[in-house]
Image (cartoon, grey):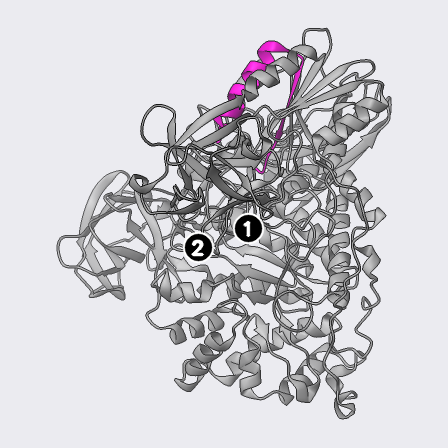
């Protein structure tokens, strides 16, 4: 279903800027030769307080007296310019992550940023006034902890180092090479610890200090420190009980990191999140208070109530009038916005260095070639065993052979919510058809889905397209063989299906205006997907009710006219449809497989269905229909290549045992089919490597909200059972060997530097690409649970047959070997033995070299007379992290229905005479903290009601004489209570 490639059409509606009064043309803020800070100070001083407040909304109004145009934050640009019309569409971010190629990701981002510049200068926005925003809401660096996350497609990897480096590369590409003058202004999303969709605006991610610093913050830090990211978007969720939009980490971490780079971060809210602080989360009772808290926490721009700024302006104005905010608080946020606008060239007389970007860059030949390269290099070869003949099945030999291209994704390419509009589409069928024909072979394309009819019981008529608008009706007189009455039924699992009409070639969808149905949709799309349905049993055998997923209503048929409307609130009022099968899709696929020399079977997901923004996946298995199709086709033609085209990993255990070849690609954009053809037929070596673990089907994954990767065992770093396909896995058509791993130092100090070198050689007969991966691990960590492995570096190399290369990785011990020490409240390197390993994936590490870190051993944690944060535990069970106050600090509480157990290792208790705890409690009744030293209970502290969760008090209990000095301490929290901190009192100190 490809379309002919054509250049993007020149817009007929170029934007117009407001006229600039000659009197203001030469003001300092319009002079690019004036230092940035002075320009911002000049403009800020000319704005009234009300004008400055108005700039806090996403849609900032014009200031005509100063010749300032309207300003909008945010254009989606995750893997190409989105939502603005035809533009180059690159692979999904998870596909870009699979390239492990910073140079390529930088090039993709540079192309995206250049096209966004063209849209800004040549096309007016569809919504709002002014110009299309040059603030790019990309990249997403949220880590892919749980493969069931609905937005898995948006992130790069499960590993913080890989995500951080690719995120930095994407930011550099968007921003351009001039650190002061910006092509676009990239925004990192979504801060922080955001990896679930179900209940996302009300769920809290429990992130203890180790996980916070080693994992979630690490993904954001590099781009912020390097200055490539100009801002950050706060996430919808809460972290440790506090909404991200009022997180103290915005200032204490993000802006602290950004300081040395020389520019302040511009922090934006996610859509409607400011209102969520009151409406969904009930964290504040008052919107003015909530907006003030968000602004003080570091939010600079409020994305709320669409393009209507009046609500936000009213709430902030009220906050100022009530003394919750000062003019200086408003100025601080506006200053950050104005600095970005200056750097983008908005106030320059000539529009800045990128103002001459021509429209012709959009969809240019150069960008199309880059889209093909990115799609090709993102493809991962997961398995390649012999079919019925000797030797691996791939690459396929197409000369004089017949290839069946089968499956529900064989002849379609899907866009996702953050995709641009593809200017053309090369499907797998298109790509293979052209490449196989060029090699002297033939292809047969079969989707393998049932073709069905639906007959209405009330009229006896078949549901069919009627009229010019492709409306569906059920009237008598339409025969079963009429394409207008036939639908290709795509089953996406969980009872969700789509119906594509054979005559129109378009999908049936709900029409909002009159609740009718029309078969006029190119494919499922939109925030509210209108093209998904369920067939629910209704009546006798073979009778069903047709239910729209959106809205949940059922189809009814007017018995007099046959008109269909989706208006019934419950199944009792629904039409009874009899399902007829015109063509058995699996039987058709099996027949095609039996005629073929080899099969390419393409299954996967539609990014709008059963796993997307607002909806997590239910599981990691293939849809049952896809699994059955796979098994039947492989049984018929063993020479089958399974291609999984998806936004996330699947548990394809059966395929790994029975299908000789398994390939994964993300939804790779407009050139997906050409890229797959190049890899499957051997014109390109499969260069992709998995950016996240593919778990087995019988692997019981941790809970979705279990963000403690250490305790839960998430990712390759802590997951002990063998995965189906490991992080970093990917095969080549040639044979690489690694040898001569050597370290420049066998012993290194805790703040030292060392270099690891390794030789990689192409020992095969083909040109190929290898990604050499370097990992580290602590041999026997004494004070913390160390990762099983940790990625320390990687290098992608392309080698001809017989060619070799020596790769060098220079590592700082304080980065590669460090962990977050709760004893010290900082990163630390524990002295002792480590191992540096090199290989092709986290499960294929043939080379290792020992490394010893020298230095003083960590001292016991001093506990007497010292306040210890309750959240700084070494281990835990049955507890949850909560907010200590609305503005700062963490506390610990028992999880609902559980006793909270907290373990603090190696505390120096010499001289301890009493235990004092900072506690709060909302209700009366019994609650207590049991203190155990060296495994033995020594005290019980009863906790009274304090009258509120944020009303803290200190309570003490005496301790018996303790044997020795250094012990592990276990605190058991029973009942409804919250513990913020504790102290062991010694001689001369006392609690209350």
Q: Secondary structure at mark 1?
A: loop
Q: In the image shown, does 303 or 306 lie closer to the viewer?
A: 306
Does 630 sit left or right of 19 as displayed? left
Span highlighted in magenta in the image: 620-647
Pinpoint residue 462: horizontal percent, then vertical percent.
48, 33
Q: Position of residue 580 (x, y in %)?
A: 47, 25
Residue 526 shows which numbered tag?
1
**Other-residue count near label 2 (Cα within 10 Å), few / some / many at <14 / 14–19 / ≥20:** many
Q: Based on the picture, tell me whether residue 629 belongs to the magenta stretch.
A: yes
Q: Which quarter of the figure is the N terminus placed in? A: top right
- The quadrant the C terminus occupies is bottom left
Residue 582: where, in percent of width, then height? 53, 23
Residue located at (44% from left, 44% from top):
561
User: Mark on residue 762?
Assistant: none
Q: Which residue is mark 2?
A: 237
**Callout count:** 2
Q: Secondary structure at mark 2?
A: loop
Label 1: few (<14), some (14–19) or many (≥20) C-alpha neighbours in 10 Å: few
Q: Is residue 397 magenta?
A: no
Front-most of 689 and 792?
689
Residue 85 appears in which quarter of the rendering?
Answer: bottom right
């Amino acid at each position: 279903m490809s379309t002919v490639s054509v250049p993007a059409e020149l817009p007929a509606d170029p934007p117009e800027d407001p006229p600039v009064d000659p009197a203001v043309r030469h003001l300092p803020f319009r002079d690019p030769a004036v230092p940035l800070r002075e320009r911002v100070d000049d403009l800020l001083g000319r704005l009234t307080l009300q004008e400055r407040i108005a700039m806090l909304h996403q849609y900032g109004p014009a200031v005509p007296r100063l010749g300032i145009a309207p300003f909008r934050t945010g254009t989606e640009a995750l893997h190409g310019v989105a939502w603005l019309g035809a533009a180059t569409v690159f692979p999904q971010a998870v596909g870009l992550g699979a390239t492990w190629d910073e140079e390529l990701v930088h090039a993709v981002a540079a192309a995206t940023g250049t096209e966004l510049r063209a849209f800004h200068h040549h096309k007016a926005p569809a919504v709002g006034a002014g110009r299309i925003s040059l603030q790019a809401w990309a990249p997403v660096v949220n880590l892919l902890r749980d493969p069931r996350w609905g937005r898995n497609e948006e992130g790069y990897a499960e590993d913080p180092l890989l995500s951080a480096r690719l995120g930095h590369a994407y930011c550099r590409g968007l921003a351009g090479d001039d650190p002061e003058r910006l092509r676009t202004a990239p925004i990192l999303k979504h801060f922080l610890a955001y990896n679930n969709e179900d209940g996302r605006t009300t769920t809290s991610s429990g992130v203890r200090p180790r996980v916070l610093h080693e994992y979630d913050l690490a993904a954001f830090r590099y781009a912020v420190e390097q200055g490539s990211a100009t801002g950050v978007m706060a996430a919808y969720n809460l972290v440790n009980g506090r909404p991200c939009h009022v997180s103290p980490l915005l200032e204490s971490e993000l802006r602290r990191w950004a300081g040395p780079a020389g520019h302040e971060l511009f922090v934006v809210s996610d859509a409607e999140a400011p209102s969520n602080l009151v409406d969904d989360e009930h964290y504040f009772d008052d919107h003015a208070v909530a907006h003030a808290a968000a602004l003080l926490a570091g939010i600079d721009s409020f994305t709320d109530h669409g393009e209507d700024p009046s609500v936000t302006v009213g709430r902030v104005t009220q906050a100022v009038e009530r003394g919750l905010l000062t003019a200086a608080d408003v100025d601080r946020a506006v200053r950050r916005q104005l600095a970005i606008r200056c750097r983008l060239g908005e106030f320059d007389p000539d529009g800045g260095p990128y103002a001459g970007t021509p429209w012709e860059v959009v969809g240019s030949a150069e960008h199309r070639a880059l889209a093909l390269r990115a799609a090709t290099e993102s493809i991962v070869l997961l398995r390649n065993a012999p079919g019925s003949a000797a030797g691996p099945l791939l690459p396929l030999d197409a000369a004089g052979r017949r290839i069946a291209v089968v499956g529900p994704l064989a002849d379609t390419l899907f866009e996702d919510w953050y995709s641009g509009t593809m200017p053309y589409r090369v499907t797998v069928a298109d790509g293979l058809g052209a490449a196989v024909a060029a090699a002297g072979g033939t292809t047969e394309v079969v989707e393998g889905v049932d073709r069905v009819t639906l007959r209405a019981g009330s009229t006896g008529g078949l549901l069919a397209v009627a009229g010019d608008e492709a409306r569906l009706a059920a009237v008598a007189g339409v025969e079963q063989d009429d394409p207008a009455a036939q639908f290709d039924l795509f089953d996406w699992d969980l009872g969700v299906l789509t119906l594509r009409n054979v005559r129109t070639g378009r999908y049936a969808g709900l029409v909002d205006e009159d609740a009718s149905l029309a078969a006029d949709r190119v494919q499922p799309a939109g925030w509210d997907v209108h093209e998904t349905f369920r067939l629910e049993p209704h009546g006798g055998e073979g009778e069903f009710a047709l239910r729209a997923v959106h809205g949940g209503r059922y189809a009814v048929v007017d018995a007099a006219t046959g008109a269909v409307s989706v208006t019934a609130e419950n199944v009792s009022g629904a039409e009874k449809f009899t399902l007829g099968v015109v063509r058995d899709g699996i039987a058709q696929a099996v027949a095609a497989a039996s005629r073929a020399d080899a099969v390419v079977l393409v299954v996967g997901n539609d990014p709008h269905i059963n796993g997307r923004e607002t909806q997590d996946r239910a599981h990691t298995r293939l849809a049952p229909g896809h699994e059955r199709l796979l098994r039947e086709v492989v049984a018929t033609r063993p020479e089958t290549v399974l291609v999984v085209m998806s936004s996330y990993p699947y548990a394809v255990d059966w395929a790994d045992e029975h299908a000789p070849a398994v390939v994964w690609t993300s939804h790779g954009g407009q050139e997906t089919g050409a890229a797959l053809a190049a890899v499957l037929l051997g014109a390109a070596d499969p260069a992709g490597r998995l950016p996240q673990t593919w778990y087995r089907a019988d692997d019981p994954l941790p809970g979705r909200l279990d963000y403690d990767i250490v305790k839960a065992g998430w990712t390759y770093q802590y997951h002990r059972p063998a995965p189906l396909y490991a992080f970093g896995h990917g095969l080549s058509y040639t044979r690489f060997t690694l040898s001569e791993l050597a370290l420049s130092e066998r012993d290194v100090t805790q703040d030292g530097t060392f270099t690891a070198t390794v030789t990689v050689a192409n020992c095969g007969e083909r040109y190929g690409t290898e990604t050499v991966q370097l990992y580290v691990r602590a041999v026997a960590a004494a004070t913390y649970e160390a990762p099983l492995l940790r990625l320390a570096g990687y290098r992608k190399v392309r080698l001809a047959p017989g060619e070799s290369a020596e790769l060098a990785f220079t590592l700082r011990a304080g980065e590669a070997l460090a962990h977050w020490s709760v004893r010290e409240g900082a990163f630390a390197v524990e002295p002792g033995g480590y191992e540096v390993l090199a290989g092709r994936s986290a499960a294929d590490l043939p080379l290792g070299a020992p490394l010893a870190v020298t230095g003083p051993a960590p001292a016991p944690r001093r506990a007497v007379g010292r306040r210890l944060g309750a959240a700084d535990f070494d281990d835990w069970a049955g507890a949850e992290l909560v907010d200590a106050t609305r503005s700062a600090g963490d506390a610990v509480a028992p999880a609902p229905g559980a006793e909270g157990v907290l373990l603090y290792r190696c505390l120096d208790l010499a001289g301890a005479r009493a235990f004092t705890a900072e506690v709060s409690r909302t209700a009366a009744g019994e609650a207590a903290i049991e203190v155990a030293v060296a495994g033995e209970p020594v005290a019980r502290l009863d906790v009274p009601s304090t009258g509120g969760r944020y009303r803290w008090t200190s309570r003490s209990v005496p301790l018996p004489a303790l044997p020795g000095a250094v012990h592990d301490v276990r605190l058991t929290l029973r009942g409804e209570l919250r513990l913020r901190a504790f102290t062991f009192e010694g001689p001369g100190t006392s609690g209350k």
